[in-house]
Amino acid sequence: MPDQRDLTENLAASQGLAHMVAESSRLFQVPEYWLFQNEDSFSDEMRQSERGQCPTQNSTQAYLHDSMQIVLTEARDKFKGWTTCVASEQVELAFKKVDDAHPLRLWKASAEIEASQGEVLNRILREQNIWDKNFQQSKVIEALDKHTEIYHYTTQSAVSQPPRDYVVQRSWQADIHTGTCVLAAASVEHAGAMCEGIRGEVMACQYLIQTTGLRKTRLTHICRTDSRGRTPEWYNKVFGHQHAAELLRIQDSFKPEMKETKI
């Protein structure tokens, strides 16, 4: 039989674990004092956010426009400077370290899809429920113009964790002459988006959609997302393969057997 000391320690451990579960949404957030102590490592927009001054829609739109131009430039240069990883025969996976204070890598996955450029864009924008296995719900909070909107979506987490939600401003543009379309997104704050669990941060997200033939498209997804609550080691060893698997699900969603299953 355990003695009284063992019983007391077990009770304390159980109570501590129960408290961590109940307060999980707070445990996965960065403390405010940490942000202020390290504000020199953040951009001007991040520093504004820490002081309660959220980045404006115009400044975010300028960032998205710049990120789209960078992706187009990198595509013309054949994405030089990326480190290739082994993923699958159907997906090309690579990463690149970003020269800032954040430890997360920038990941890139590319795959060929048997669908038109418009179909692929619509699948990404309006049919996330088809290819995102963790998808729960989504809505467009505000349409800023024909090609820009504030988008709020929620994904399920592991059984022991609350769901994760993301609020992003996303914008897209297409060039009919080159058959190229680019979509970019980044996290923003919006009064109309109530937190549904753990608020993740999309630091960078770009989709490059290139027409390569009749109903043939090359889709490249560049992503840097902090889902909160995971170590840098997890992002280095696991996130990239999940990123590649997501692109495979988009690819598979256009196969005839997948369409029949959905019907």
Image: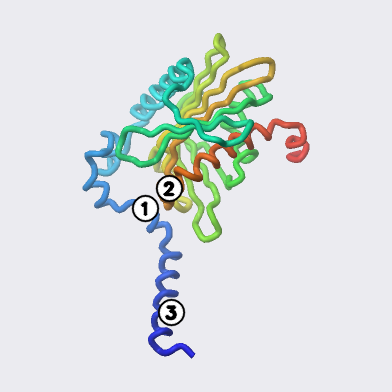
Residue neighbourhood size for the residue with mark 1, other residues' Cα within 10 Å, grouped as few (<14), some (14–19), many (≥20): few
Three-letter residue code for mark 1: Gln
Q: Which mark is residue 233?
A: 2
User: What kind of element bears circle 2?
Assistant: helix
Q: 58 or 104, which lies in front?
A: 104
Q: Which residue is mark 1?
A: 29
Mark 2 vs mark 3, CA separation in Å: 31 Å
Picture residue at 48% right of the left edge, 46% below the top: 165
Q: Amino acid at mark 3?
A: Asn
**Mark 3 — residue?**
10
Q: Are marks 2 and 1 in contact (CB under 8 Å)?
A: no
| Mark in the foreground, 2 or 1 | 2
* Residue lying farthest to the top in this orientation: 177
Residue at 27% from the left image edge and 47% from the top image edge: 35
Label 2 vs label 3, nearer the camera: 2
Q: Nearer the viewer, residue 165 or 216?
A: 216
Q: Residue at x 27, y 38 (%)?
A: 42
Q: Does residue 186 appear in the picture of this structure?
A: no
Q: CA distance from mark 3 to mark 1?
A: 28 Å
Characterize the local packing of mark 2: few (<14), some (14-19) or many (20 or more) Cα atoms within 10 angstroms: few
Residue at mark 2 to residue at mark 1: CA–CA distance: 19 Å
Residue 225 drawn at (x, y percent)? 44, 40
Three-letter amino acid code of the residue under disc 2: Glu
Image location (x, y in percent) of residue 180: 54, 17
N-terminal of the two: label 2 or label 1? 1
